[in-house]
Image (cartoon, helix red, strand yellow):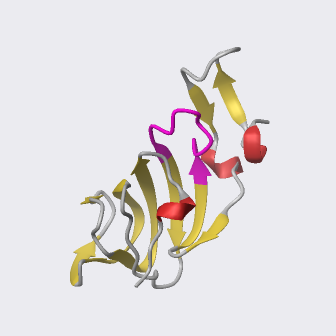
Amino acid sequence: MGRRGVLILAAEPHGERHQIVRLSEIAPVDCPCGKSRRAFVDDLEQVASLHLVEISVDARAHYHKRMTEIYFVLEGAGEIELDGLRQSIRPGDAILIKPGCRHRAIGKLKLLNTAIPAFDPADEWFD
């Protein structure tokens, strides 16, 4: 087990040049979107993190000042609201969300969220 109880399947002995994690074994945490399993948030270089997000309720609109997110819809159907505009989304859709864009997901969805740089809870802003 690695930091924060994350199962690390493979990593170099003395470095952080690679990691392999099993998302299904990372404990979910509450987030404005529902539940999220967050991988690579403890990486020392904070290059990016990957989140398996289950949206079970309409997410709270929020934005980030530094972080860019890429959502990839795995399951379900619903909508994404970006700066007040709604668009239908379904499996296979990818959404690029740049810093400052107010966003939220609507509906019952499962998605992968890539955060660049890695997720920082201090960079989550609500109006």
| Residue 78 in sight in this render | no
Left or right: 98 as drawn, with respect to 75: left
- Quarter of the rendering occupied by the C terminus: bottom left
Residue 101: image quadrant is bottom left
Q: Position of residue 15 (x, y in %)?
A: 63, 18
Q: Position of residue 45 (x, y in %)?
A: 52, 33
Residue 56 vertical position relative to residue 41 in the rendered view, above or below:
below
Residue 112: image quadrant is bottom left
| Residue visible at 47% across and 62% down in the picture | 123
Q: Position of residue 47 (x, y in %)?
A: 45, 37
Task: Report the span colored magenta.
Answer: 38-49
Q: Residue furthest top?
A: 13
Count the marks: how many?
A: 0
Q: Is residue 26 magenta?
A: no
| Residue visible at 42% across and 51% down in the picture | 115
Residue 118 vertical position relative to residue 84 in the rendered view, above or below:
above
Q: Position of residue 35 (x, y in %)?
A: 60, 69
| Residue 54 in sight in this render | yes
Left or right: 92 as drawn, with respect to 7: left
Residue 1: image quadrant is top right
Q: Main secondary structure of the magenta part?
A: loop
